[in-house]
Image: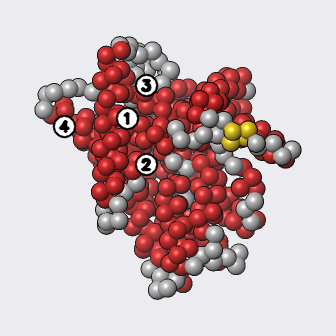
Amino acid sequence: MFQLDFYGTLVAASLVLLLGRGLVSRVGFLRTYNIPEPVAGGLVVALLLLVLRLFDIKVQFDTSLQMPLMLAFFATIGLNADFASLKKGGRVVGIFLLVVGGLLIVQNAMGIGLATALGLDPLMGLLTGSVTLSGGHGTGAAWGATFSEKYGLASASELAMASATFGLVLGGLIGGPVARLLIKRVKTPGLGHEEVQLPKGFEQPNEERSITPFSFIETLALISVSLLAGSLLSGLLLGTALELPTFVCVLFVGVILRNGLSALGLYQVFEREVSVLGNVSLSLFLAIALMSLKLWDLAALALPIFILLLAQTLVMALYAIFVTFRVMGSNYDAAVLAAGHCGFGLGATPTAIANMQAVTQRYGPSQLAFLVVPMVGAFFIDIINVIVIKLYLLLPFLGAGA
């Protein structure tokens, strides 16, 4: 057993990102299908660890940095969201919410129907539906415990974690190919589309940004306040009807902080700098998450559960192509949105952002997609998902009366 401490894990994550960049730049397949760099590097390391495990060589990472990095990323999403921009995209956000809500219903119907056909407990179908795929690890852990305690579903928490991990991997792998297929049908803006303006948000993270030590400290303070206040707010809401995941509270505080300071004329958030810190947090989070994947847990999934998850992956791809893309306008923005939807429809919002970055760095910016996906994928989807899951649990054959 090799146990890497905090520093060793940070070094390993940095090397994973460099490996991912090298692979994407040199392997035509990865570049052609817009596979995100952290996904490429992280999966190679995860596969290497799987091979080492066959020889009884185990490597353990210190993942204590993973949660703060994820929360810091969501804080930057909130700090970059101003109400004026949200107002401009209000109608599009509403339409995308309907599209996302439709997928939640389809995922659960597909999961329950296929689980029943395979002779499994229908609750397993629900657990491998929107609970863990659109919901991710956090939602999966919460509902897994409920399914075990209230409905008597054995090993629900373990199944939830394995399903969410499977979704994280596939969400990062199918977004690029789906976008590539759709982009063949539309006109792309090109990388020089906004030559006059510096890129904003998370669209082109490799562009040069001017940062001073003092401005860095200011932005770091805003992120820190968002983390602290968001964590406190999440604690206050714990156990109430308004309970929300910590990352949603952190994002919400970031939005309030940015717009409150601006409205009072006290401070204007340095968006380009926030995006730099957000991209650093996002890249390191994904690197640690993917290199720490326990692929042997996925291999240990029973064949029927594996069939369920593969079917959900196919449904996600088809939904993004035939529903998300068409409903959102059948244009370049819609193609980027479809790639993002694959990311958080199977995995998590950081995966969605990574998918969209891989596309926009090659074909040009999409400010609309980077406005809509973070807010819907990080905030609204959790609220809608809870409602959809509870409505499905009212179905008699799922044991709601237990």
Q: Is residue 201 left or right of residue 400?
A: left
SS label for mark 2 = helix
Quadrant location, the N terminus: top right
Along the line of sight, the residue nearer the viewer: 56 or 23: 56
Question: CB atoms at circles 2 and 3 under 8 Å apart?
Answer: no
Q: Residue 236 at what x, y percent from top left?
A: 29, 57
Q: Is residue 264 above or below residue 311?
A: above
Along the line of sight, the residue nearer the viewer: 270 or 222: 222
Query: Mark 2 or mark 4, which is nearer the start of the sequence?
Result: 4
The amino acid type found where label 3 is placed reads: Val
Q: Which residue is mark 3?
A: 276
Q: Is residue 235 above or below residue 193?
A: below
**Disc 4 from disc 2: Cα separation:** 23 Å
Query: Mark 1 or mark 4, which is nearer the start of the sequence?
Result: 1
Q: Which residue is mark 4?
A: 260
SS label for mark 1 = helix
SS label for mark 3 = helix
Question: CB atoms at circles 1 and 3 under 8 Å apart?
Answer: no
Q: Residue 400 at what x, y percent from top left?
A: 47, 82
Question: CB atoms at circles 1 and 2 under 8 Å apart?
Answer: no
The amino acid type found where label 1 is placed reads: Thr
Query: Mark 4 or mark 3, which is nearer the start of the sequence?
Result: 4
Q: Which residue is mark 2?
A: 377
**Disc 4 from disc 1: Cα separation:** 15 Å
Of badges 4 and 2, nearer the viewer stands 4
SS label for mark 4 = helix
Q: Which residue is mark 1?
A: 76
Q: Residue 329 at what x, y percent from top left?
A: 43, 44
